[in-house]
Structures are given as C-alpha cells and as structure tokens.
C-alpha cells in the first residue's frame, strides 16, 4: 500500500508549483534573476513524461505562503527491486548520461538507511567526476551520480540507531568526495546512505531547499574551521554567488561572528551578496579585489584564484582554496561529509539565520537531469541547482 509522506513544510492547498514554498522567506531566490526564470515548459528530450507543473516568476514565490503539497509529497510504498536512475558507463560529456528504468535498488548495509529520494542537488564534483577527472580514485563504472539528497527513510540497517522509517532526512551521501564515492548516488529513486552522513531535515525547509544544502554547507563550514575563523575576523569570499560561497558568507556572519564580510560576484549577483550579509560586494567584472587597499584575515577562494587571493590576505592570515592551483600560504582541502555538521547547523537553518540559495532556473524535473548538468557546467549557476520531483 502506497502512502504519501508530505514534507513538514507543506501547509497549503493551492494548486501546486514545485518552486513555491511555505518557507519562501527562508530561501534566497534572487528576484533579479527574473530574466532566466522560465515560465515555459522545457522541451523534454528524454523518455520520461514531462512533469506537469508550470513555473512562476520569483516575485510570486517570495510573496507566497504556498507550498506544493502534491509536489513535495513523497510516495512511500513497497520497495521495488528496480528503480529509475541516471547512469553513465563511460567517462565523458553530458551525453554519456543515460536514463535507465531498471537499475537495481541498492541493498542497505548494517549502518545504512535506504532513502526514497525526494530531491537531489548537483555539484561541480558530479560533473568533474563524470568527465573522468577523478578516475584514479573513483569507484568502478557504471555509476549513478549524485551526492546531495533529501528524502524519506524507507528501510534501516540492523545497526542503525538514530533514524527510523518515515524520518525526513538530508545529507551528502559520500563521506570522501573523491575517494570511492558510491556507485549508487542520489540521482535515483532510492539511495543507501550511512546514518552518520545524515541529519533530520530542518523542519522549516522543504525537500528542495534541504537537498540544496549538504555538500555546499559542509564545505563552507569545514573551510571556515580549517582557517581557524572566529568572531571578530574579516573575510573575503571569492565567488559569493555560487553554491559554496553563498553559504560561506552566511556562516561567516551568522555562525562564526565575522566583523566584516566582503565577496565577489558578477554584476547581476551583487544584490544577492548583500542580501546574504556581505558588507562589501565586489563586481569581479569591474574591480580587481587584490587591488583594494583593505586586506582580510581570511580569504575563502571558491573559484580557483589562489594566486590572487594571497595578495588580499593580511600578514599571518589564512587563504583556503577549493579548486585550482594553490599558492602559499594558501591551502586546499576536500570536504568530508559529516551528518554532525548538519545537526550543528540545523538550528541556524530553522531560525532562518542561514538560508538555502536555490537557483531560480530550477528545480529541474528528473527528466531534465542532463539539461541541469549542462547548466551547472556553464559555471553561471546562482546558488544550487536542484532536481525535483524524482521521478
Ligand atoms: N574542495 C572541496 O571539497 C570542494 C567542495 C565543493 C566545491 N568545490 C569546488 O569549488 C568550486 C565552487 O563550487 P560551487 O558549487 O560553489 O560553484 P558554482 O555554484 O557552480 O559557481 C557558480 C558561480 O560562480 C560564479 N563565478 C564565475 N566566475 C567567477 C569569477 N571569476 N569570480 C567570482 N565568481 C565567479 C558565477 O557567478 P557569475 O555568473 O556572476 O559569474 C556563479 O554564480 C568548484 O570548482 C567546485 O568543484 C570544492
């Protein structure tokens, strides 16, 4: 018998739009991005049925109390042996991604739960992994990609203590992003995940918002911790409009107590930076941040400009880089997924001090995963690109 588990944020019965949320005020969806917000249906180039919802301009979203009960509900029924998933069997461009209706549902190990996936988010690492950039440490192909998940627990392993069937959870399913990531990722109807990588979904967030967070917020937090960031320090965030940077700005200000946050973005995202808490928004198309007279205690490089970042840091300060070549004293790290970090940050999310930033071009329905990949691979996404509903 199939039951519907609705996201706890779903209160209203308005005809549903997946992009509407009862917690709209809890999500930054840059209203100045109207230009690329689509009201038209995307052309379905895959075998799935076109999702049957429309898209609304963001201004409506921001004013609405509506959540989509229908689109945010998760169908939880008997666990099938096969599922729909996106798969690739060779490394390459977006075209290697194939939709497959007969992928075996993963078995849960004793420390894992099986999640019925409600929403998944894309990360640059998904694209780089698919391109074969981490071949040496990847798990064997074929692979179902996807790190970020939000969904409902439908089965628990024998040693699982914290979660039970029916719990709404979220997390980054790969403890080590580059070392043996799972073959059965989150771009599927089901995914099996160690309980230590998960947390209960913040009550005020819907599945779309929750799925947008794990890898990016854990990276933002780990990077800040690794620099020894603390109250009263100043920080410059390079790429403040991306998935990670938009959360670095907020965590630096709201969780760590930064005295000053500066961030770079293109012209169209400067207002977003300010709305996230940046005291100084620097347009990288017009200004060179390293030429500013002001220097910072920490520079958080989320774009790959470490050679320039080190020129903007104070003597004795720290430069953390997520990608690209490292110039001393800069250092790079690779995020470790950790459900405890999500649990620690949940109160900030539930109080609205820290907000998810979901790219207004999405969410992309499951049938449009390839299009969603093409989009993030332009390096122009604002915040996170989310896939929902699944399927
Ligand atoms: N080491 C790790 O553990 C780790 C973890 C997560 C991510 N990463 C890496 O960190 C990088 C950032 O990830 P992400 O998910 O935050 O990226 P993202 O969301 O895909 O970044 C897209 C954003 O980059 C901005 N951008 C493009 N060129 C820029 C420039 N020159 N200066 C400032 N902003 C610019 C774009 O803004 P405009 O459209 O306005 O240009 C867009 O908003 C990626 O390379 C990713 O692989 C590493």
Image (spheres, grey):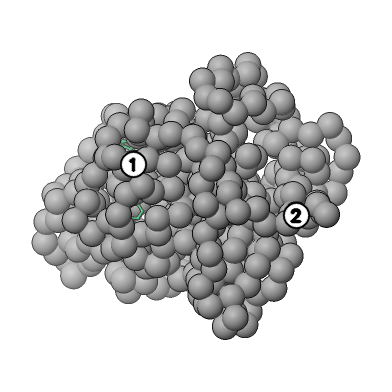
Residue picked out by circle 1: 89
Percent of width and height locating residue 96: 34, 33
Residue 137 in sight: yes
Judging depth in this view, the residue of 268 and 149 nearest the camera is 149
Quadrant that contains the N terminus: bottom right
Residue 37 - label: none
The relative height of residue 267 versus residue 301 in the rendered view (above or below) is above
Please state if 196 lies on the left or on the right of 132 as rendered.
right
The residue sitting at 59% across, 33% down in the picture is: 365
Which residue lies under the disc numbered 2? Answer: 77
Residue at 40% from the left image edge and 55% from the top image edge: 183
Disc 1 crowd, CA 10 A, few/some/many (<14, 14-19, 20+): some
Q: Secondary structure at mark 2?
A: loop
Q: Quadrant of ligand 1?
A: top left
Residue 20: image location, x then y, percent: 72, 37
Q: Whole-percent x and y of residue 347? A: 63, 69
Q: CA distance from mark 1 to mark 2?
A: 29 Å
Indicate whether 135 appears above or below 41. Answer: below
* Residue 352 can be seen in this image: no
- Looking at the image, which residue is at 56% across and 20% down? 44
For the C terminus, the image quarter is top right
């Amino acid at each position: 018998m199939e039951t519907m588990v609705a996201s706890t944020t779903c209160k209203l019965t308005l005809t549903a739009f997946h992009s509407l949320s009862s917690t709209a005020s809890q999500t930054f969806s840059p209203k100045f991005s109207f230009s690329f917000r689509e009201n038209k249906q995307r052309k379905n180039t895959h075998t799935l049925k076109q999702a049957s919802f429309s898209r609304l301009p963001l201004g409506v979203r921001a004013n609405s109390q509506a959540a989509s009960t229908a689109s945010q509900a998760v169908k939880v029924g008997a666990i099938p042996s096969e599922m729909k998933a996106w798969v690739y069997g060779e490394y390459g461009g977006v075209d290697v991604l194939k939709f497959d209706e007969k992928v075996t549902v993963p078995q849960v190990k004793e420390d894992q739960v099986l999640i019925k996936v409600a929403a998944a988010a894309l990360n640059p690492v998904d694209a780089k992994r698919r391109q074969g950039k981490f071949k040496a440490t990847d798990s064997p192909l074929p692979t179902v990609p996807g790190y970020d998940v939000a969904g409902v627990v439908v089965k628990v392993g024998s040693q699982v203590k914290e979660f039970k069937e029916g719990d709404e959870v979220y997390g980054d399913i790969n403890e080590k992003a580059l070392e043996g990531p799972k073959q059965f990722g989150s771009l599927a109807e089901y995914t099996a995940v160690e309980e230590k990588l998960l947390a209960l979904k913040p009550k005020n967030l819907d599945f779309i918002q929750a799925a947008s967070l794990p890898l990016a917020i854990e990276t933002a937090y780990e990077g800040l911790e690794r620099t020894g960031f603390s109250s009263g320090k100043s920080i410059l965030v390079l790429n403040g409009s991306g998935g990670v940077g938009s959360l670095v700005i907020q965590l630096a200000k709201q969780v760590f107590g930064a005295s000053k946050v500066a961030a770079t973005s293109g012209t169209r995202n400067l207002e977003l930076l300010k709305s996230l808490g940046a005291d100084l928004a620097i347009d990288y198309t017009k200004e060179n941040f390293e030429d500013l007279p002001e220097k910072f205690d920490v520079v958080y490089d989320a774009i790959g400009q470490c050679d320039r970042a080190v020129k903007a840091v104070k003597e004795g300060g720290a430069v953390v880089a997520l990608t690209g070549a490292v110039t001393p004293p800069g250092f790079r790290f690779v995020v470790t997924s950790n459900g405890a970090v999500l649990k620690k940050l949940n109160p900030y999310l539930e109080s609205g001090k820290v907000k998810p930033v979901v790219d207004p071009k999405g969410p992309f329905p499951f049938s449009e995963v390839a299009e969603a990949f093409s989009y993030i691979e332009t390096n122009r996404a604002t915040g996170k690109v989310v896939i929902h509903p699944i399927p």
